[in-house]
Image (cartoon, rainbow, N blue to C red):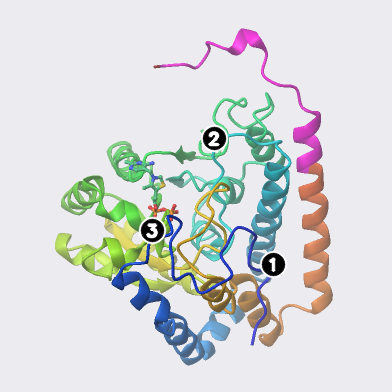
Amino acid sequence: MAKAATGPRAGIKTDTATKNGSGKPLDSLTEKRQSADFPDVDKAIAEYNARKDSQLAAIKKTDKELLRKMLYEMVLSRRFEEKCAEVYRMGKIGGFCHLYIGQEAIGVGAMLALEPTDMVVTSYRDHAQAMIKGISPGSVMAELYGKATGCVGGKGGSMHMFSKEHEFYGGHGIVGGQIPVGTGMAYAAKYKNTGQVALCFFGEAAVNQGSFHESLNMAQLWKLPCIYICENNQYGMGTSQERAMSIRSIAKKGEAYGMANEFVDGMDVMAVREATLRAVERARKDGSPTLLEVRAYRYMGHSMSDPGNYRTRDEIAKYQERDPIVLFKDSLQEAGVLAEKDYEAIEAEVKDVVEKAAQFAEESPLPDTSELLTHVYA
Ligand SMILES: Cc1ncc(C[n+]2csc(CCOP(=O)(O)OP(=O)(O)O)c2C)c(N)n1
Ligand SMILES: [Mg+2]
C-alpha cells in the first residue's frame, strides 16, 4: 500500500471522536459517517486499478518533460505549504491561511492542460494555483508574510494572490464569489474573441450558493468557454458534504443546465489532466462550458486555526493511502519514465526553491507607510 507523503497533523483528534468540540454527542448522521468503512476510498482504489492500463498508456503518450513538470509542481506545492504551516506556527504569517495539501493533483492536472494565455480564478485556498500559473514561490511566500515584494505588494495576504501578467485573477474570500467572476472572464474572452478559456475552481460547499446556479445557467445559455472545477474535498469548514447537500453527485448538477459534466478522481493527476483536456477542447471548439467534479481530500484543517474536531485521524489516514504524489510517482516509475534518482533530484530542487522563497520573504521589507491608502477601493 502506498505511503502518504505527509502524515496526519497535530490538532486532529486521535480518538474516535464520539463527541464534537462542544462536548455534545454527535448527531446520528455524523455517527453514521464515522462508523462507515470509508466506501469512497475502497471504490476509488478499485476504479483506479481498473483504469491503470489506460493511465499508463496516457503517461506513455505524454511528453516526458511535461510529466516531470507535473510531478515537480505537485512536490513544490506540498513542500511549500509544509513550510507555510511551519512559519505560520512561528507567527511569521498572520491572518487566515488555508492549505492545499492533499489536493495538489487537481491544480496541477487541470492547469497544466491549459495554454499560458488562459485564465484562472479560485478561492482563498490559492497558494498552489498561483505558483502553478507562474507566480514565483518567492513572491507568493512574501505575500503570505505581508511584505512589499509579495505578488500584490503585501496587501492581499494568503487569500488574495493575483497576477494580471500571469492571467491569475485571485484568490477570493467569499465562498462562491469567484464563480460569477470566472463566468465573466469567459464572457470577456468570447466577446473579445481572444480564444482564451477560463478555469474556475471552487469548493463543494460553494455549490450550495445561488451564484453557482446562476453562473452555470448563463454559461450554458450563452456558450461561454468556462471550465468549472469543483474541488470536492468533502468538507466545508467542519461540515461534511453529506450533512449539507441533498444530492451527493455535484457533476450531475450540470444536467440541470444541459452542461457537459464529469466526475473525476482528484487523487489521480492524469485523470484530472485528461478530463480537463476534453473540457478545453469543448471550450475552444464552440465555447461550450463544462462542469468537473473532482473529488479529493484535504489533509490539513480548513485553515491553520481549525482544531479538526469533526473527523478522526483514522479517516485522514485512510484517504492518505491514496496520496496523489505517491500514486503519480509510482505510475511514472511503472511506465518506465522516472527513476528513483529523478524523484530525489526533484525533492532536492524543491527544497532549495522553498528555502530561498522563505529567505526572500524574511529579508524583504514591509510595505512603505506611503502605500497605506493606495489600491484601496472601499
Ligand atoms: C458567502 C460566505 N459564507 C460563508 C463564509 C465562511 N466560509 C469560509 S470557507 C467556508 C467553507 C467553504 O468550503 P468549500 O467551498 O468546500 O471549500 P474548501 O474550504 O473546502 O476548499 C465557509 C462557510 C464565506 N467566506 N463566505
Ligand atoms: Mg470543501
Which amino acid, by three-letter code, is at mark 2? Answer: Ser
Residue drawn at (63%, 64%), measured in percent from left and top? 70
The residue tagged 3 is 229
Badge 2 or badge 1: first in the primary sequence? 1
| Vertical order, 155 against 187 (above or below) | above
In the image, the segment drawn in magenta is 357-377
The residue tagged 2 is 163
Q: Are marks 1 and 3 in contact (CB under 8 Å)?
A: no
Which amino acid, by three-letter code, is at mark 3? Answer: Ile
Q: CA–CA distance between discs 1 and 3?
A: 24 Å
Nearer to the camera, 317 or 361: 317
Which amino acid, by three-letter code, is at mark 1? Answer: Arg
Q: CA–CA distance between discs 2 and 3?
A: 20 Å
Query: Where residue 27 appears, x then y in whole percent?
Result: 31, 67
Residue drawn at (49%, 56%), measured in percent from left and top? 114
For residue 122, side relative to residue 7 (left or right): left
